[in-house]
Amino acid sequence: MAVDSVTLAGQTVTVKRSTQPAGNRASTVLGRRLGGELLRLRDAAGKTQQQAAESINATGTKIVKMERGWVPMRDPDIRVLCEFYGIEDRKVLARLMELARLDRERRKAKGWWQHSPNAGALAEYIAMEDVASRVRTWQLSLIPGLFQTAEYARSLAVSDGVWEDPDEIERIVEVRMRRQGRLHDERPLQVYAVVWEAALRQLVGGPNVMRAQLEHLLDVAKLPNVRLQVLPFHTGGHPCITGPFSIVSFAETEAVDVVHVDTIVSTVWVENEPESATYSSFFDRTARLSLSQHDATLLIERIRQEN
């Protein structure tokens, strides 16, 4: 896990960049969050990794793996470590135990994406999205993946240039379409999307594909669990002008929001509470500058008629 920094409207936040090979695995984002909490507590207590290991009758290697989020954590180990670190606040212990429980559930998840070899680097994000309660997404130049038509997604895959085999492209499209099931299942995902006007005007796949995509976007916006706003060109500069991102939230009160930033060469996760709160603040400020859902749909319809 490499550490980078991202500048968001002049403010720099620390992020973690996934350097592990892409694969079909449940997300370890919460595991890394939990491990980071335990590392912070150990440092504050002035204990070494070897001392922590001895407190739970383990090796130093196990503590390293725990603090890096590489392994699921047992409740007894967390209790003993907290006692060893002098943690008396029951709320702190309860929060760590809840993070451990959530992480174990993520790792055991047998989602459909684990059988989709072309999910690639998105596999970790899909695992998070599948158990999330809400996603807030800001997009500069693309229609959000959860709102894309098959033709639009196919055109993106073709233009990407990475995928040349038609069968591979179709599997990529299938993954994108299956993700959208969360919008309609028994526990529908709440999606709050803010899209820059450029995403509506970029002719991905040509006029016919884009016209159908905008029609679909209007239909999706009618869902009770979807909120869609558009940031128009005339707004000018805005807080989120530097790049797109998604904020993933969970129903559990102790779960921390996780921010996903997909770049050309890597996937970036912002996993700590203060910095994810920074992204939430910038998202909210950009949303306040955007058109209301009603006005956004009027603009989408106007652009659709132009194609």
Image (cartoon, rainbow, N blue to C red):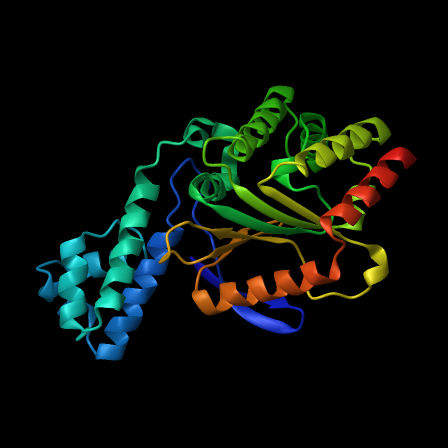
Depicted 154 relative to depicted 231: above or below = above
Residue in view at x 61 percent, y 27 percent: 173
Q: Position of residue 185 (x, y in %)?
A: 49, 30
Q: Residue at x 63, y 62 (%)?
A: 284
Determine whether, in the image, residue 288 is placed left or right of residue 123. right
Q: Nearer the viewer, residue 68 or 90?
A: 90
Lateral position of residue 208 relative to residue 174, left or right: right
In this rendering, the answer to whether 47 lies above or below 157 is below
Q: Quadrant of residue 12?
A: bottom right
- The quarter of the rendered structure image containing the C terminus is top right
Q: Can residue 217 be seen by looking at this rendering?
A: yes
Question: Front-most of 91 and 240?
Answer: 91
| Residue 297, position as x, y percentages in the image | 77, 42
Q: Residue at x 72, y 51 (%)?
A: 140
Give the x, y percent position of residue 53: 14, 64
Residue 240 visible within the image = no
